[in-house]
């Protein structure tokens, strides 16, 4: 069994209550998601970023919307990298790098904050 790999955690603050932040995240996903990060509408991708429609061989992304005095806190956790096999460390490093989840969550915060 592969050694557990620490999850990636990203947090952004928004000036909206959690319900509104969630609605923007869900309903306007295609508008605010970086176009060059789209994979034909498939969510399960391999470590080489090709489609892999196998939940047992895919990582997990959890997004939680919490109330905050200034609006809401959105917490993203990407875990389960050990399911990727040989490419697991590289894929985790790519998603943790500045052009991975940090960029994606910053773009979301910019977009949602302006709504």
Image: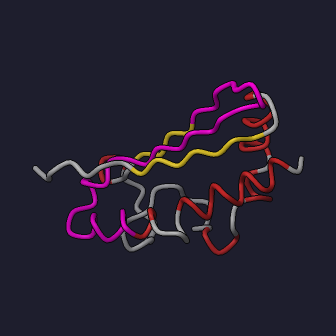
Could you tell me which residue is drawn at 55 percent across and 71 percent down?
99
Could you tell me which residue is drawn at 80 percent across and 55 percent down?
111
Q: Residue furthest front?
A: 69
Could you tell me which residue is drawn at 31 percent across and 71 percent down?
90
Whole-percent x and y of residue 44? 46, 56
Question: Magenta segment range?
Answer: 64-93
- The part of the image, by quadrant, that contains residue 41 is bottom right
Could you tell me which residue is drawn at 42 percent across and 70 percent down?
94
Whole-percent x and y of residue 59? 37, 51
* Camera-side residue of 96 and 36: 96
Q: Residue furthest right?
A: 115
Whole-percent x and y of residue 101? 54, 59
Whole-percent x and y of residue 64? 58, 33
- The part of the image, by quadrant, that contains residue 66 is top right
Residue 21 in the magenta stretch? The answer is no
- The part of the image, by quadrant, that contains residue 17 is top right
Q: How is the image coloured?
A: secondary structure
Residue 83 in the magenta stretch? The answer is yes
């Amino acid at each position: 069994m592969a050694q557990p790999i620490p999850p990636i955690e990203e947090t952004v603050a928004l000036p909206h209550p959690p319900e509104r932040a969630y609605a923007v995240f869900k309903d306007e996903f295609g508008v605010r998601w970086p176009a060059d990060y789209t994979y034909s509408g498939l969510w399960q991708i391999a470590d080489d970023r090709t489609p892999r429609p196998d939940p047992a061989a895919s990582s997990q992304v959890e997004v939680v919307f919490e109330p905050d005095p200034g609006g809401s806190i959105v917490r993203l956790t990407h875990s389960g990298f050990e399911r990727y096999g040989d490419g697991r460390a590289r894929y985790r490093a790519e998603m943790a790098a500045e052009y991975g989840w940090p960029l994606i969550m910053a773009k979301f915060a910019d977009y949602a904050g302006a709504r």
